[in-house]
Amino acid sequence: MKSKRLFQVFVLFTLLISSLGGSQPAFAGAHTIPQQDPIIINRNLNIWDATFIGFVSAGIHEKWSLELTEPHNFEVKASTVAGDLVPLLILLDSNSVELARGTGSLITSRPAGSYYVQVQPESGGGFYFLTLRDVASTLPSVSTVVNPTSLTVGEVAVVTVNLNNVPAEGYTSAEFTCTYNASLIDVGTPVVTNLFGPDPAVAISTPQAGSFIVAIAGSNGNKAVTSGVAFTFSVTGLQAGQTAIECTVRVSQGNNVLTALPSTGASLTVTGTGPTSTFTPPPAESPTPTTTLAPGVTPTATLTTDPAGSPTATFTSLPAESPTPTLTFTPVESPTPSFTPLPTFTSTPIESPTPIPSPTPLPNGTLTGQAIASKPVTVSLYDAGNTLVTSVTANPDGTFSLTAPAGTYTVVATASGFLNAQGSAVLNPGSTTTKPNVTLLAGDIDNNNVIDQFDALTIGINYNSASPAAADLNNDGVINVLDLELLAQNYRETGPIVWG
């Protein structure tokens, strides 16, 4: 009975405080109340599975500090106990940059570090209970593990990058961005596993300023459908210090959209010092003596040896050569030419042949169809001698129409970075011939009629740039894993495609 009475007093006190917090002083006339920034009250949230009580309103927000000494998958939940509060939870990093938010509750996976959970009203105001609990990780994420975690200069450790909690629908491609301190460690070439199926398409960028990218796409319809190791790479200690190693990831499910997943990094300690190199300067060469000769003098050299055993060259001047004699020529008169007149010929006119009338040309024929690609398509007609007769750029939807004299042709559809489609077409005079629809295959970036690792290499070398345009397969202005994903769908295909 006594506890019930205490609860009633608590509720009355809560309602009183809530009403006071929500009231505003009255002002006469048309004056407006200036908008005030809410007061931020700092609280501490470092006890797991405990319940805290707080109060927020339009003018009061609460900011709970949270220190994680190791990676956690956790839930923060706010339950209203008095008032009309609808609580909004915002997770912030140590610089108060927003990482995630949720209404009433927030489930997230985060590495070790300093965070804040800010509670504010989405609407209303009042008292709330706040709980923090560790939950089993069910969110997709990426984790970086280094083994061993400590080494000396010159030793090697292995870094493993894992995809965790991969959903049942899987991922068609993933773009990993790995960062480290390049002054402390050197990285080896990444080795990709079969997490995305056998023979995946891979693009790896060259490490620059302590960062490199590994893009992986399942080939020919394969995808990552289970959790596991995506790739590994080695690191070698260069000098003493401690470096973070973390690989973040953006994944695609084949919808041309990249989604970032939470990531957990690792730390590597390098101890000791590297070997000190000693520089020995090469011996200085003795200067070569220079001898100046008078004009017209040809030197001869005699090699002798001085008492110390060093060779000495002695030069002797030879007398100047005799001057070259001058020849005198006496001109001889040329004989006067004589000319014999040519005989005179009389021409007989030749009758012109009777002109043969030209045949009346047949009407042109028309060829239509649809050639589909994610980039502009050009359709061309070639005659029997493989000479270009005419060409046209297809409409954005791939439809086209062109005309040419009646006859049999080879028709070719091309697009930058795609395998060509090729077939035959017979154009009849005054009528329209329609080709079946054809879809060009993306990935032939080097235009050699095969989609292979060299095309993927071009994507890796030019990652996150816009050139060469042939590598931007989805035509969105940037070369990245989405282009690799299109290439992977047609990995190892050869062309030209038969256009029926």
Image (cartoon, rainbow, N blue to C red):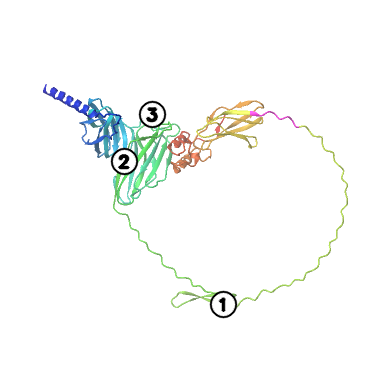
**Residue 160 appears in the picture as rendered:** yes
- The three-letter code of the residue at mark 3 reads Glu
- The three-letter code of the residue at mark 1 reads Ser
Read off the magenta span.
Answer: 358-365
Marks 3 and 2 sit apart, C-alpha to C-alpha, by 26 Å
- The three-letter code of the residue at mark 2 reads Gly
Q: Residues within 10 Å of mark 3 (few under 14, many from 20)?
A: few
Image x and y of residue 473, in percent: 48, 36
Image x and y of residue 73, in percent: 28, 34
Q: Which label lies toward us, 2 or 1?
A: 2
Marks 1 and 3 sit apart, C-alpha to C-alpha, by 95 Å
Examine the structure image and report whether residue 360 is included in the region drawn in magenta. yes
Which numbered marker is on residue 265? 2
Q: Main secondary structure of the magenta part?
A: loop
Examine the structure image and report whether residue 462 is included in the region drawn in magenta. no
Reply above or below: 283 against 409. below
Q: Residues within 10 Å of mark 1 (few under 14, many from 20)?
A: few
**Residue 199 appears in the picture as rendered:** no
Reply above or below: 82 against 325. above
Res 139 → quadrant: top left
